[in-house]
């Protein structure tokens, strides 16, 4: 099931931006709500939420020898893009009357942990190869399962080209329907590209799999 995450990575791109430190409302084109890194529909993605995820990743990688160290600006852009994508995915699922349950997340996580030799091994692999800290593992699986459901809802295999196309179409439709404002320090959300544009580097590596 991890491969579906890789398909999402091919769909989503981010923008090169400036540092996270400046106030978002300092720019005229920033989201209208003070303290928001982005606004998706009626929901704010706060700077605090972005900072919390950045801290979790940096602390986890610092504690694990050999884990890649993420450059802060790139990590901030990646985090904002991930959080926006989660909201787009949630709408795409809701439009199809679908959702991902906590039980499904737990079952998928347990299955992969068993394949890798246990929860600790799974945590290490996700951190080193996907940049996912332990506190973000459930979100990781929730996104993967949601993407799979978009493909199966269209009668496609999530791991085939038809599944990739079904996922893309569903996310484009949902992202277009949502009002998405992102602080330009992170770039601009392009619903057709399903990610942040004006990028000078990818926010996630292409064709990366857990195993």
Image (cartoon, rainbow, N blue to C red):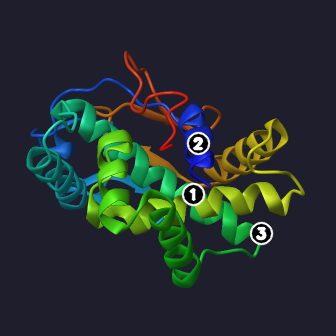
Foreground of the two, 54 or 134: 134
What residue is rendered at 42% in x and 24% in y? 202
Picture quadrant where residue 24 is located = top left
Q: From mark 2 to mark 1, how far is it between C-alphas? A: 8 Å
Q: From mark 2 to mark 3, how far is it between C-alphas? A: 19 Å
Judged by depth in the image, the label closer to the viewer, 2 or 3, is 2
What residue is rendered at 41% in x and 21% in y? 199
Q: Secondary structure at mark 2?
A: helix
Q: Is residue 109 above or below residue 102?
A: above
Q: Secondary structure at mark 3?
A: loop
Q: Are marks 2 and 1 in contact (CB under 8 Å)?
A: yes
Q: Position of residue 41 (x, y in %)?
A: 50, 61
What residue is rendered at 47% in x and 44% in y? 210
Picture quadrant where residue 164 is located = top right
Judged by depth in the image, the label closer to the viewer, 1 or 3, is 1
* Residue found farthest to the front: 117
Give the residue pinned by disc 2.
8
Give the mark nearer the N terminus: 1 vs 3.
Answer: 3
Foreground of the two, 207 or 37: 207
Foreground of the two, 95 or 152: 152
Give the mark nearer the N terminus: 2 vs 3.
Answer: 2
Does residue 6 show up? yes
Q: Position of residue 149 (x, y in %)?
A: 72, 63
Q: Position of residue 145 (x, y in %)?
A: 61, 63
Q: Is residue 195 above or below residue 92?
A: above
Give the residue pinned by disc 1.
144
Q: Residues within 10 Å of mark 3 (few under 14, many from 20)?
A: few
Q: Position of residue 55 (x, y in %)?
A: 14, 53
Give the residue pinned by disc 3.
96
């Amino acid at each position: 099931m991890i491969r579906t995450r890789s398909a999402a990575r091919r769909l989503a791109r981010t923008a090169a931006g400036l540092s996270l430190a400046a106030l978002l409302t300092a720019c005229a084109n920033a989201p209208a709500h003070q303290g928001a890194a982005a606004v998706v529909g009626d929901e704010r993605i706060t700077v605090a939420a972005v900072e919390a995820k950045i801290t979790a990743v940096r602390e986890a990688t610092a504690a694990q020898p050999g884990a890649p160290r993420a450059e802060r600006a790139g990590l901030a852009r990646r985090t904002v893009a991930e959080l926006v994508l989660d909201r787009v995915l949630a709408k795409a699922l809701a439009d199809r009357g679908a959702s991902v349950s906590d039980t499904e997340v737990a079952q998928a996580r347990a299955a992969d942990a068993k394949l890798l030799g246990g929860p600790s091994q799974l945590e290490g692999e996700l951190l080193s190869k996907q940049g996912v800290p332990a506190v973000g593992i459930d979100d990781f699986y929730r996104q993967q399962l949601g993407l799979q459901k978009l493909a199966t809802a269209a009668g496609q295999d999530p791991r085939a080209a038809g599944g990739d196309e079904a996922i893309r179409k569903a996310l484009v439709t949902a992202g277009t329907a949502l009002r998405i404002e992102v602080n330009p320090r992170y770039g601009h959300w392009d619903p057709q590209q399903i990610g942040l544009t004006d990028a000078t580097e990818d926010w996630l590596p292409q064709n990366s799999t857990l195993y």
